[in-house]
Image (cartoon, helix red, strand yellow):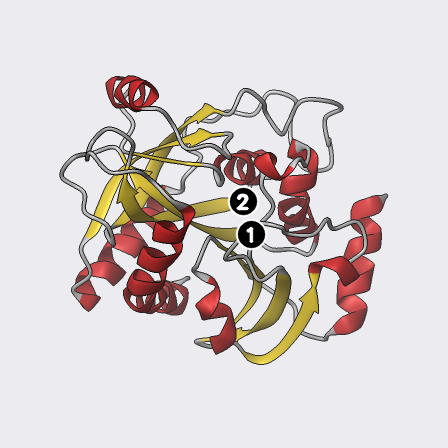
Amino acid sequence: MLIDETVAYLRAKTDLRPEIGLVLGSGLGMLGEELEDKLCIPYGEIPHFVTSTAPGHNGRMIIGRLRGRVLLCMQGRFHYYEGYTMRQITYPVRVMRALGIEKLILTNSCGGLDPSFTPGNLMLITDHINFMGDNPLIGPNEERFGTRFPDMTRVYTRALQQLARDAAKSLGVDLREGVYISYSGPSFETPAEIRMFQKLGGSAVGMSTVPEAIVAAHSGMQVLAISCVTNLAAGILDVPLSGEEVMEVAAGAGKSFVGLLREIVGRMP
């Protein structure tokens, strides 16, 4: 099986056994540099991995220690809009689970749907709406990981959400909360689409995360997801959107985001 080949390759590379998975989104890869005793592997060298082509994604896996815990850190992810299948973009999550990882932290940069948000805000994802027109579980079911029809009532683990709230409070970080809507991209949404998303109950919109969360939930993993709001979505302000703005705001918010993630990892049970 492909997953077994990838797992065997990674285990042969290091004696470290990761217990927490971390996916770092657009412009948020700086935390990976803080890991100690780390092994860095470009995605192109990992069997059955595709390569990351999105701006702001370093495209490598880092296994190392942070706050005494062993992490498997994805410095950049794969996206549906890059032309990859749902199975390809969620393959790393399957590999993490096969390695024995039970907790997964997902991060991303996103557009704010809530007018009260400002660029640089961090948002705890409490639920999601999959608006990508596809699902990573379509096709033969991976019985070794989970059931054919998994429950999605609590994709995001409540205990980890509370842990994140407590960590943010201790650091004085303003951690907002809301529902994340995933959209295929790569074009930004139209103002009409944004108005629709707001009526559906969305708080933020982005082009990632939900497929990974679905696969993680299917595999029985505990999931925590946090977004960095890099801009207000189309039509809320009368300004054009750009990928450059996303990178700039994510980099500016990076210090507080990294500090929060560091604290969360340190508090993981």
Seen at 57% across and 50% down, the residue is 77
* Amino acid type assigned to the residue bearing label 1 in the image: Glu
* Amino acid type assigned to the residue bearing label 2 in the image: Met
Using the image, determine if residue 156 lies above or below residue 57. above
Label total for image: 2
- For label 1, the SS is loop
Using the image, determine if residue 138 lies above or below residue 121. above
Q: Residues within 10 Å of mark 1 (few under 14, many from 20)?
A: some
Q: Which residue is mark 1?
A: 102
Left/right placement of residue 40 relative to residue 74 reads right
Q: Residues within 10 Å of mark 2 (few under 14, many from 20)?
A: many
Is 129 or 268 nearer to us in this picture? Answer: 129
Left/right placement of residue 223 relative to residue 240 reads right
**On the rendered image, what quadrant is the C terminus found in?**
bottom left
- For label 2, the SS is loop
Tell me which corner region of the image, top left, top right, bottom left or bottom right, holds residue 238: top left
The percent coordinates of residue 111 (x first, y second) are 32, 39
Seen at 47% across and 77% down, the residue is 34
The percent coordinates of residue 27 (x first, y second) are 44, 59
Check if mark 2's residue and mark 1's residue have beta carbons within 8 Å.
Answer: yes
Q: Which residue is mark 2?
A: 221
Is 10 or 142 nearer to us in this picture? Answer: 10
The percent coordinates of residue 114 (x first, y second) are 20, 34
Seen at 29% across and 23% down, the residue is 191
The percent coordinates of residue 52 (x first, y second) are 63, 52
Residue at mark 2 to residue at mark 1: CA–CA distance: 5 Å
